[in-house]
Image: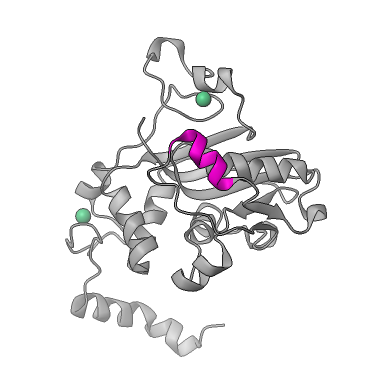
Amino acid sequence: MKDPCFALFEPLIRAGSDLLFPPSCPVCSRPLFESRNGLCEPCRQDISLICSPLCTVCGREMCDSAEGDHICGVCLRKVPSFTSARGIARYQDPVADLLHRLKYQSDYTVLPALLEIVKMNDPVLISQDDRIIPVPLHSRRLRFRGFNQALLLADLFFPNGQKVLLRNVLQRVRNTEAQTGLNGAARRKNLKNAFAVCDPCKVRHRKIFLVDDVYTTGTTVSECSRVLLAAGAREVHVLTLARVDE
Ligand SMILES: [Zn+2]
Ligand SMILES: [Zn+2]
């Protein structure tokens, strides 16, 4: 509980600190005096949101707007293991820059801006029977980076989801090379047997929300979903902050 004295003076202290160290937009450094939104208005306008019509399964943007949402040719040819995948924004700047700074520079000052982007989407409804799982890092990469960006994003997607968040049930048991630069077949081979569910009863019969930062070809989340379903999960819904344009 906050000290009542601090609670009384908190607005004053905050106003003083804002005057001395005005919060600024992490993209363009403009001061954010009035809004505590994490992004200034011009940078918000630069974010390119993913819009319907979408593939009802993988969430790919469809060019044929007359048809509305429908399943895409890729998913028709090979049905993904997950039930659905949805990304919020296209993987372009400023989103790509913000995610890069979080992942590779451990720049936590971008988190309010990422929350802002998450809030541009309708909130994802989750019940107490569902489970949230961040795509895991291998323990060696986790030690090197110090945090899992997918776990941080899971907290942004589901701020009240701590009770249904499973941190260590899905594990990355093989330290694979980065997927960047590999084609589809090489990506699948690279991730073969990379994930395992260490406590299947925690996912059995559950609807799972699988969270990651970027959806590129879907190979990583497909492999995670396959392993979760094999462990008894009922269905897997993938949520990512960004999606690579194809
Ligand atoms: Zn800005
Ligand atoms: Zn699709």
Q: Is residue 171 magenta?
A: no
Q: Main secondary structure of the magenta part?
A: helix
Apparent side of residue 225 relative to residue 26 in the rendered image (left or right):
right
In the image, 53 versus 1, the foreground residue is 53
Asked if one can make out residue 13 in the rendered structure from this viewpoint, the answer is yes
Q: Is residue 190 magenta?
A: yes
Apparent side of residue 245 relative to residue 221 in the rendered image (left or right):
left
Quarter occupied by residue 61: top left
Apparent side of residue 112 relative to residue 30 in the rendered image (left or right):
right
In percent of width and height, residue 108 lies at 37, 68
**Position of 171 relative to 123 (above/below):** below
Residue at the image point whose x is 40% and y is 10% from the top: 66
Quarter occupied by residue 24: bottom left
Quarter occupied by residue 245: top left
Residue at the image point whose x is 62% and y is 52% from the top: 194
In percent of width and height, residue 49 lies at 35, 37
